[in-house]
């Protein structure tokens, strides 16, 4: 070590710089463990569903991507039940579709398109009927949405989404076609 008296000092410095830089460059992923236990959420679609479009969030908040899941419900005119005890934070039309969003204690669970009588500020309980899927051709659907199809999203901040299927108790079983 007499030949390289400053080697230990230089390696320590390089290591600290690398750690500091990596701390700021590494971005959190969308697949992080949600802040609440999955056992707290109720499966909101009575009768089950098939996955149409999987959760595929963009790398950056401004890019396009699937920030939730698109599902075909086995019961196309079925009801939607609240996945949690919470409060309605949005119940209005957005981009031509009726959207319902519930604050589940820090995670916002969003459904669209829906038919609902709930208003912003109302409390809901886990398993309570909160909405139904609009019939095909109704004012809340569009030609791009098939009958019985619904979008379900979950977000933990203004721009950070998580896969809502991960919030269900156990492991969801999707029926293959």
Image (tube, helix red, strand yellow):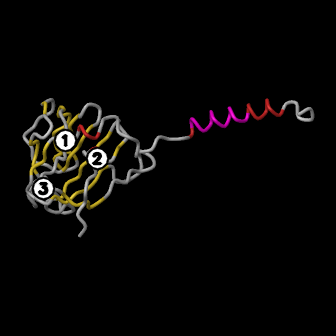
Indicate the position of residue 176 as horizontal and vertical percent values. 25, 67
Q: Going by the picture, which residue comes out furthest to the bottom?
A: 177
Tell me whether the residue at label 2 lies in contact with that at label 1, contact meaning CB atoms closer than 8 angstroms: yes
Tell me whether the residue at label 3 lies in contact with that at label 2, contact meaning CB atoms closer than 8 angstroms: no
Mark 1 crowd level (few <14, some 14–19, many ≥20, 10 Å Cα): many
Indicate the position of residue 145 as horizontal and vertical percent values. 19, 60
Which SS class for mark 2? helix
- The disc label shown at residue 164, or none: 2
- The disc label shown at residue 83, or none: 1
- Give the side of residue 26 with respect to residue 161, left or right: right
* Residue corresponding to mark 3: 47
- Give the side of residue 10 with respect to residue 94, left or right: right
Q: Give the mark, 1 or 3, whose residue is nearer the N terminus.
A: 3
Quote the CA–CA distance across marks 2 and 1: 10 Å
| Quadrant the C terminus occupies | bottom left
Quote the CA–CA distance across marks 3 and 2: 17 Å
Indicate the position of residue 49 as horizontal and vertical percent values. 19, 58
Quote the CA–CA distance across marks 1 and 3: 15 Å
The stretch in magenta equals 14-24
Q: Give the mark, 3 or 2, whose residue is nearer the N terminus.
A: 3
Which SS class for mark 1? loop
Q: Give the mark, 2 or 1, whose residue is nearer the N terminus.
A: 1
Indicate the position of residue 69 as horizontal and vertical percent values. 28, 53
């Amino acid at each position: 070590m007499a030949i390289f008296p400053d080697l230990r000092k230089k390696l320590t410095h390089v290591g600290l710089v690398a750690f500091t830089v990596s701390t700021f460059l590494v971005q959190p992923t969308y697949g992080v463990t949600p802040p609440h236990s999955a056992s707290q959420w109720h499966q909101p679609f009575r009768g089950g569903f098939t996955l149409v479009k999987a959760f595929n969030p963009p790398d950056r908040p401004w890019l396009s991507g699937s920030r939730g899941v698109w599902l075909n419900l086995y019961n196309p005119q079925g009801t939607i039940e609240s996945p949690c005890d919470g409060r309605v934070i949005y119940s209005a039309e957005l981009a031509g579709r009726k959207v319902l969003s519930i604050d589940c204690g820090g995670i916002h669970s969003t459904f669209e398109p829906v038919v609902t009588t709930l208003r912003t500020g109302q409390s809901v309980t886990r398993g309570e009927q909160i909405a139904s899927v609009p019939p095909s051709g109704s004012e809340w659907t569009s030609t791009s949405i098939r009958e019985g199809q619904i979008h379900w999203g979950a977000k933990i901040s203004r721009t950070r989404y998580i896969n809502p299927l991960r919030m269900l108790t156990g492991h969801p079983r999707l029926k293959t076609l």
